[in-house]
Image (cartoon, rainbow, N blue to C red):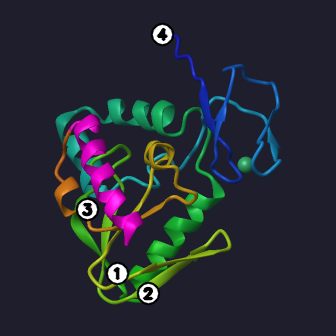
């Protein structure tokens, strides 16, 4: 089976890049200027952003290989997690350790199904040279590349009230619902 990849995320800043799909040819990111060599994805932390319950569900259904393929080719698009992705995850884990946020029982409805957190008090995430404030009751979730592209987010983090989107839906339905929610967030 041949998989044609036309999108790639910069491993340094996470920006979506156009890519002709050829390996072994250097790509320069127009946003941060870093140059890298795209290669077949070989990440040992493929499951870094997958909620453990979500992964267990796929395992139970015997379809874990499908999810793995999706993360490799649709989420990572032949690349690997960006530094911003990793920094965001570390910040979420720090806040959880410090008791400011707690992991909810459910997870985000889009692959790779990251955990969703709820803020127990106000606070902020600090990564990529920026601060992201949240209020008590807000939900926090790491934003996958697809979510970032669609809503033109500068950073891989969504903060808001997403309770109605947490149930699993098709991508299209969810995107519409999220779009309404995002508008509300931006107007606040
Ligand atoms: Zn870049």
Query: Which quarter of the figure is the C terminus placed in?
Result: bottom left
Q: Which residue position holds label 2?
A: 123
Give the residue pinned by disc 3.
162
Q: Which residue occupies 68% across, 47% down?
A: 11
- Mark 3 or 4: in front is 3
Q: Nearer the viewer, mark 2 or mark 4?
A: 2
- Nearer the observer, disc 1 or disc 4? 1
- Give the magenta part as a residue range: 170-188
- Label 4: which residue? 1
Mark 2 C-beta closer than 8 Å to ligand 1: no
160 relative position to 2: left or right: left
Alpha-carbon span between mark 2 and mark 4: 47 Å
What secondary structure is the stretch in magenta mostly built from?
Answer: helix
Q: How packed is label 3: few (under 14 Cα within 10 Å), some, or many (20 or more)?
A: some
Name the residue: 44% across, 87% down.
Answer: 123
- Which badge, 1 or 4, comes first in the chain's sequence? 4
Marks 1 and 4, how far apart in space? 43 Å
Question: Dot 2: what SS?
Answer: strand
Of the pair 94 and 21, the residue shown nearer to us: 21
Q: Are marks 2 and 1 in contact (CB under 8 Å)?
A: yes
Between discs 2 and 4, the one toward the N terminus: 4
Local secondary structure at mark 3:
loop
Quote the CA–CA distance across marks 1 and 3. 15 Å
Q: Where is 170 relative to 54, above or below?
A: above
- Tell me which numbered mark, 1 or 3, is placed earlier along the sequence: 1
Between disc 2 and disc 1, the foreground one is 2
Q: Which of marks 1 and 3 is in front?
A: 3
Q: Against 84, is 42 above or below? A: above
Indicate yes or no: mark 4 CB to ligand 1 under 8 Å: no
- Numbered label attached to residue 101: 1
Q: Position of residue 85 (x, y in %)?
A: 56, 58
Alpha carbons under labels 2 and 1: distance apart: 9 Å
């Amino acid at each position: 089976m041949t998989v044609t990849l036309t999108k790639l995320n910069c491993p340094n800043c996470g920006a979506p890049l156009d890519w002709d799909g050829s390996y072994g040819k250097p790509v320069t990111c127009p946003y941060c200027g870093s140059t890298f060599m795209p290669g077949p994805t070989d990440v040992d932390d493929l499951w870094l952003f997958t909620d453990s319950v979500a992964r267990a569900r796929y395992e139970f259904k015997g379809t874990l290989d499908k999810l793995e393929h999706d993360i490799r080719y649709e989420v990572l698009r032949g690349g690997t997690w960006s530094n911003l992705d990793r920094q965001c995850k570390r910040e979420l884990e720090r806040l959880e350790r410090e008791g400011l946020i707690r992991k909810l029982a459910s997870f985000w409805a889009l692959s790779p199904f990251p955990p969703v957190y709820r803020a127990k008090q106000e606070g902020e995430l600090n990564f990529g040279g920026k601060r992201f404030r949240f209020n008590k009751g807000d939900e926090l979730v790491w934003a996958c590349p697809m979510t970032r592209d669609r809503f033109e987010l500068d950073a891989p983090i969504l903060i808001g009230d997403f309770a109605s989107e947490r149930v699993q839906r098709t991508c299209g339905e969810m995107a519409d619902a999220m779009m309404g929610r995002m508008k509300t967030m931006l107007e606040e």
